[in-house]
Amino acid sequence: MADIKVAAYICKGCGLGERLDTDALVKVAQKDGKVPLAKSHDFLCNAEGVAMIRNDIANEGVTHIMIGACSRRAKTEAFYFPENAVARANLREGVIWIRPDTDEARETTQEMAEDYIRMGCAEVKAMTAPGGNPVTGSSKTLLVVGGGVTGMTTAIEASKTGYPVVLVEKTGALGGWASKLYKRVPVHEPYKSPADTGVGELVSQVLGDSNIKVYLNATIAKTDGAPGRFIVDIATESGATHTEDIGAIVQASGFTLYDMNKLPELGGGKSPNVVDQAGLEALAIAAAAGDGVIRRPSDGQPVKSVVFVQCAGQRDPTGTHLAYCSGYCCNTSIKQAMYFKDANPAVDTTIIYTDLRTPGNGEDFYRSAQEKGVNFTKGKVVEVVPNGATSTVKFHDLILGDTSAAMADVDLVVLATGQVPNSGVNIEVPAAPAEAGTVEVKPISILNLTYRQGPDVPQLKQGFTDSHFICFPYETRRTGIYTAGPVRRPMDIAQAREDATGAALKAIQALENAELGRAAHPRSGDLSFPKVRLEGCTQCKRCTVECPFGAIDEDEKRFPVVNESRCRRCGTCMGACPVRVISFENYSINTVGAQIKAVDIPDEFAEKPRILILACENDAYPALDMAGMNRIEYSAYVRTIPIRCLGSLNTIWITDALNAGYDGVMLMGCKSGDEYQCHFVKGSELGRTRLSKIDDTLKTLNLESERVRDLEVAITDIKRLPEMINKYAAELVAVGPSPFKGF
Amino acid sequence: MAKHEYAFYPGCSSQKGASASNYLTSVEAMCKTLDVKLTEIPDWNCCGASIGYAEAGELPRHVMNARNFALSEQHLPGQEIVATCAACWLGARETRERLSHSDTLMADTREALKEAGLIINEMPNIRHMVEVLIEDLGFDEMKKYVVRPLEGVKIAGYVGCQTNRPFGVDGESFENPQYLDKMVEMVGAESIPEYEQKVTCCGGALAFSEPEKAQAQIKDIVESAYDHGAEMIVTPCPLCQANVEIYQGHVNKKYGTKFNIPVMYYSQLMVVAYGGDAKAAGLNGQVIKARRLEEIAAKPVKR
Amino acid sequence: MSANTAVAEKYRNNFLKEIEEQVEMGDWVKMCMQCGVCSGSCPTNFQSAWEHPPQELFMMIRAGKREEVLTSSSMWNCTSCYNCIVRCPRKLPITHIMHGIAEYAHRLGMAPKMQPTRFFSGLFWKNCTNTGRVNELKLSMGLYFKDGFVQGIKNGMAMQAVALGLVKAKRLNVMELFSGHKCKDQKGIQAMLKKAYEIERSRKAAKMAG
């Protein structure tokens, strides 16, 4: 390792100079931090202050920089030294802004600041400047899987942005579901009548674009590699396989209509005159090709009355059918009712709904249908009884409270059955052994990933392949692979087109980042990546299993292989490793451990407890900073260390802290479980699983369970967090000082 | 010449010996002070009111109002029609809107009017007196004439329905109109902006036909004013005034309450504040006497 | 054949169409989206629960419940406060539709005979169109005596205090019973109204004829 030279800079601006003894801080950096070069500056982030640091880098040979000023989340542009290892001691948001400006508080506030200087110096010495991922790929080609509206839109948008596209469609033609529609729900003023689907235009745009290479009757046989360097085998009908170099992938594999045969009580499969929405589109297309009259499938007689049954097999609380609302079906039924009314106003059209959901301009469309005389009845259909050529629709009228309402002599019944995503193999469900004598239909993989974790992207809920419901649309838990359209969540054409555009841009961002060796969000631009000291590896596989992004494979000797471009830099592997051989250049067991050890622990008679806070940098740490910005005070006894994710938590940190005489440890991570808010999906959950074993450690040390506190924190907990800290500090006073002080 | 001139549509209830005759008395005194000239439309007829619906039908109802328009056009050309009664204003305004939006209805109306020898060429503007006060004069102008502020009198502004819905006064919300509160402040009294029953219906014509239903509402209206410490209630509508005032006895009997709150017209407050005496303000027309106002009206005017 | 059976036959199962063609503002009924804001905004509904609030009446019309709608007393509970109109997110002129259905039921002779507001409504219109102006005393007396002479005296006694108060305040004139206010051109008014009824009837008939 090259020689390092550490310098510490203490800022006196923003009131730091008035509230703190900065000369003493400089001395602490020199004496305790053992930093050869320590300076203070009146206004460190201004041009002059930054020039001073640059000058020291250039002329004094400074390699490692410790800045004692504001939070690491502030002034990131001023304090940007990409060639150097940089640590930040948070004296502003973390100390003076959360402490009262009183004489009594001055001593503890100064102690807090001095500890943060010690911690910063220790941290920076444990770091090296990240050098970036050496195994990058530079493919700029986008693979789009699926040739429906979403896939075609993704291809067109990416191509327009200047990126070549390979589009793979499993059928013999582009167009997908939309090409089977007679018309679509309108998306332009005045939203009054069904509109042309526009699919023909999309298809010709794709086919006419030399930047888009289309494979029809083709599937993905294998997807290997990582963002920027995917190698994808495309199997075609002829049996030939084509291999393409791909930078990023958009999966637009669409949906299948929920099978109406599962709804015999609603007449599904019982009569040709009970159809699903796709069935009606087919009838309408057939009618348009003929005399324009939609006819009864059973005998070809013109339909004089039609009933639309909304939420058929949807929003089912019993678990038998789909639990969710597909969102588009109300507008679709309105559109289909208009097929009848526009051709012949005398046709009776009734839509039976429980809650009509027509968001946005769908409201105008709904109103237009009412004007056209489509009848809307709020009710729940109980049974559809086919009887010869017609059916009786029995329903519970929810307005009139009539439980035995019925419509007789209905020519055609249309069931609005909803979307089921085509998401391939659910990798989280172990394949059940096929029972003897049964023919099991196994889902067919869409992407055939060679990843250790399974062949398709993980599913979120109800089979949809989303990853994060708040912050990151289009993301899957496979870096560089994005899903768009109804495979991600139920949606209509307009939403799918918007989705496709967003996913195309995210995919482009991912492949550009991959080429530069940088992380995708949320640590966008991060050049560090996990390094495994294989000599110490016990091949336990925890890192490969726990990585939420499937970044780590195993080689033939079962050692972990990190695919850096797939990595999001959450550090979950680092936290998982029992022998602590995984680290990042600027984040490791040591960088955190050294900080924990650097804190000056007063003896048990000083009545100054010390509480270690390990705070998730995505939610908890910003919340603490914001508490500071709002000048919300909290205990001076806490020492906070930001961590990348609770998933990166290694329990050695807790053991070290308790051994060093800390009175308590607070862990602040995001919500985990079904309604998780973790930026790395599984990180906080995995961290907490590890933490569940901490009680054993506490018992071994003969310590009370109160010594460790796990808190679920959201970024909005700006007021709550200080309250929780103060409450915990008070609780610890009751528990008494740690017996480990002074050792 | 007066500053402002209008064709006046007083309405049935404002006639001598009718239920809102004191309203007219006070309006006349108020307009004199404000230099507003009201010329009664000769031989005007009833608007039909909303309650006439069982027999009225659509066209006959509009024809009734249209007759007034025609008379106004004939005798007072170019003048806007001003009504003091909420129902008259609403009825006339509704007819104006409907006829303006339907050529058929307009043609039918003209045909019927012919039978009375009348003709409409132009649709008149229909204004309520409070619109005239707020929009044509403004609060600053109205305030100029206050010589006897109603200091310390707490008054609940009861707007009611028909000056407020469905048309309302421009710029005011249906749920919380504030012009009456501003008028109360303007005459130097204390308003109760938080009076939550200010737009509750008094029961309208149901006060006659199904009194128990109306009285339940009247109770809420009076009770809330009472709870907010109001000494009196002020309203712009003759039917609101009558219903809320004269049925307090019945409400007391039925609910065991002891309400005795005077219900005034805005114009009465203004006349007293402008230095008018009890007679000019029509205070003798109160069934529940407004003692506090009478006292103020008896005081000499500071000039 | 009565007026009622004639239209019922003509429109057969299509009560919605009947309402659209025969009732003032009836063509708005189909636009109701069943949110129930009208029902929640109606003062009468709060006080004593209508049999069928507006939302429900509209649904009944769409469900073809002709007899139930037209014989209902619900529409007659309207106080004309216009709260439903200003709150309806679909901008249905609900107050007018209520009046319109009531008027239609009255026209067909299906409205409940002794419904007090129906009675008062008719009384009011006759009162005001008789001379061109309302005679408040005759109007009140007419209402009190609607259930016969004895009941009328009782009703009058119940209202005695109110009436006396008004008389004292010079807001009720007993002489109105004999003379009262009136328009000069009563003849013109009668002729004009007669014509208006004629036109209106012919328009409705034309719609029914298609």
Image (cartoon, rainbow, N blue to C red):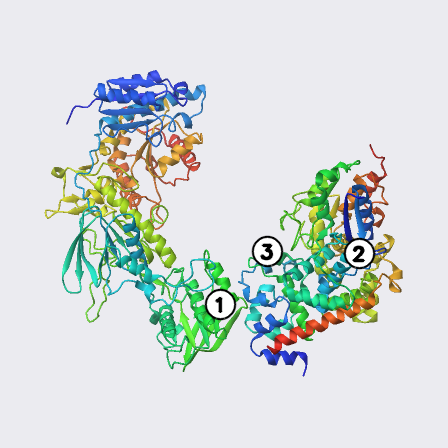
The image position of residue A210, as x and y in percent, is: 23, 54
Q: CA distance from mark 3 to mark 1?
A: 24 Å
In the picture, measured across the screen, residue A382 lies left or right of residue B146, that is: left
Q: Kindly report which numbered mark, 1 or 2, lies closer to the viewer in this rendering.
A: 2
Label drawn at residue C87: 3
**Rendered position, A584 above or below A373:** above
Q: Which of the 4 quarters of the picture holds residue A741?
A: top left
In the picture, measured across the screen, residue A412 lies left or right of residue A563, that is: right
For the C terminus of chain A, the image quarter is top left
Chain under callout 3: C
Proximity of marks 1 and 2: CB atoms separated by less than 8 Å: no
- Are labels 3 and 2 assigned to the same chain? no
Question: Residue type at mark 3?
Answer: Arg
The outermost residue toward the left is A557
Q: Kindly report which numbered mark, 3 or 2, lies closer to the viewer in this rendering.
A: 2
Question: Residue type at mark 2?
Answer: His
Chain under callout 2: B
SS of the residue under disc 1: strand
SS of the residue under disc 3: helix
Proximity of marks 3 and 1: CB atoms separated by less than 8 Å: no
SS of the residue under disc 2: helix
Tell me the residue that label 2 is attached to. Answer: B75
Question: Residue type at mark 1?
Answer: Gly
The image position of residue A625, as x and y in percent, is: 39, 32
For the N terminus of chain A, the image quarter is top left
Tell me the residue that label 1 is attached to. Answer: A379
Residue at image point 86% right, 53% down: C170
Q: CA distance from mark 1 to mark 2?
A: 59 Å
- Are labels 3 and 1 assigned to the same chain? no
Q: Badge 3: how crowded within 10 Å, few (<14), some, or many (20+)?
A: some
Which of the two residues, A642 or A128, is positioned nearer the viewer here? Answer: A128
